[in-house]
Amino acid sequence: MLDTGATHKFVADREIQNLGLTLAQHSSRIKAVNSEVKPIQGVVCVDLKVGSWTGKCNLMVVPLDDFDVILVMDFMLLAHAMISGEEGYFDVGVASKIWFEAWKQTYLAALIEMKLDVVQEFLDEVAEACYRMCLAKLAELRKQLDGLLEAGLIQPSKAPYSSPILFQRKQDGSMRMCMDYRALSKVTIKNKYHIPNAIDLFDKLTKANYYTKIDLRSGYWQVRVARGDEPKTTCMTRYDFFEFLVMLFGLTNAPATFCNLMNDVLYEFLNRFVAVYLDDIVVYSELLTNYLRFLRAVFQTLREYELYAKKEKGEFCCEQITFLGHVISQENIHMDSRKAKSVDDWAIPSKVC
């Protein structure tokens, strides 16, 4: 039996006796609905075959009257199973398995490109000198430029534009290369596409019981700069001029362009079981039986449009998530305490100038 509400996987004690399997000791007890508390006789690791799926499972041995084995939600995730509520069955080992892939040299040019419309008479204003760097930063610059060239994200440029580069240190100590596009942004015609209001997104999320958070890998880099506009992204370095083939964070219209992209890709799911803010996607569901179906639909759509997720940042089947600086669950929404920590820990001023 498949029981999505059970806490553990179980096997009937009579089956263990018939198979002559050895148990590992377990001292816990269990109470089922309309039943008295019963001791768990032990735990056994067995080779299990369900449909086309085979693998090892740890089963708790208890007295069962009507079933030989009870499987639960974690088995469904392990076996890539999907419930069909309408047709009354569940598939195991579904062929369309979702893969998280490392992204390299993949553009979404077929769906959307970033257009950099600038006022041409101000071209001379977008010609900045490069910033001075210490030897350590110059070495880091060369390393990152080589990586971007190898990945096909930049190419040498002879454009009349130039924007400087600077570095910002990340929390893990590594260096993030940033482009100073302030001069370019001043003469760029602004994209007025609507950015979602966080409060509007929260309204839907509080009605769910299960959440999955998906973070796209290098989100903006998955959008190609419109062909012919690459020279406008040119940055000046000690080594050469380079122009970007993909959208960067410092470009003034990048958020609006990416928001337009995500709304187009996930349009049919929005306000039904998906909330999206730039490259952060939340899949939510009230019922566990619908959860996998929703999740598979979202992943399949991302796959079709060649948008790649960051595996290490994904959170799956959670009853509580952190989204846009807030902790969200069915019970409530509150500010993430980590965001307010710097203010809470702010020392009381000891003198007034």
Image: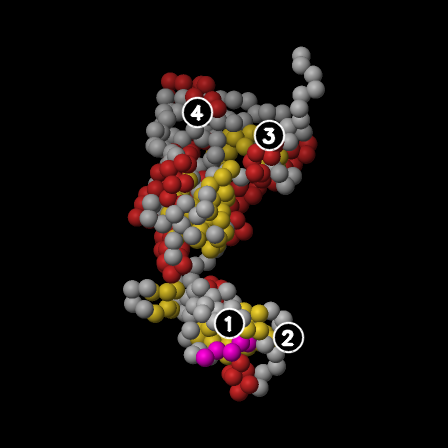
Disc 3 residue crowd, few under 14, some 14–19, many 20+, Cα 10 Å:
few
Name the colour scheme.
Answer: secondary structure
Secondary structure beneath label 2: loop
Residue 227 visible, this orientation: no
Are the residues flagged by discs 4 and 1 in contact, CB closer than 8 Å? no
Span highlighted in magenta in the image: 61-65
User: Looking at the image, which residue is at 51% across and 34% down?
Assistant: 242
From where the camera sits, is residue 330 visible?
A: yes
CA separation, marks 4 and 1?
70 Å
Q: Residue at the location (57% across, 86% down)?
A: 20
Q: Tell me if 347 is positioned left or right of 242 in this view.
A: right
Q: Which residue is labeled 4 in the image? A: 185
Q: Which of the two labelled residues, at mark 4 and mark 1, occupies the earlier sequence position?
A: 1
Which residue is nearer to you in this view: 171 or 22? 22
**Mark closer to the chain start, 3 or 2:** 2
**Residue type pointed to by label 3:** Val
Residue 36: assigned label: 1
N-term mark: 1 or 2: 2
Residue 4's x, y, as percent? Answer: 43, 65
Near-viewer residue (184 or 82): 82
Q: Which of marks 1 and 2 is in front?
A: 1
Real-space CA distance between mark 1 and mark 3, rounded to the nearest whole angstrom: 51 Å
Is residue 41 one of those drawn in magenta? no
- Decide whether the magenta segment is chiefly helix, strand or loop: loop
Task: Please tell me whether mark 3 sits on a helix, a strand or a loop.
Answer: helix
Q: Tell me which amino acid carries mark 2.
A: Gln
Mark 3 vs mark 4: in front: 3
Q: In the image shown, does 59 or 36 lie closer to the viewer?
A: 36
Mark toward the viewer: 3 or 2 = 2
Amino acid carrying label 1: it is Glu
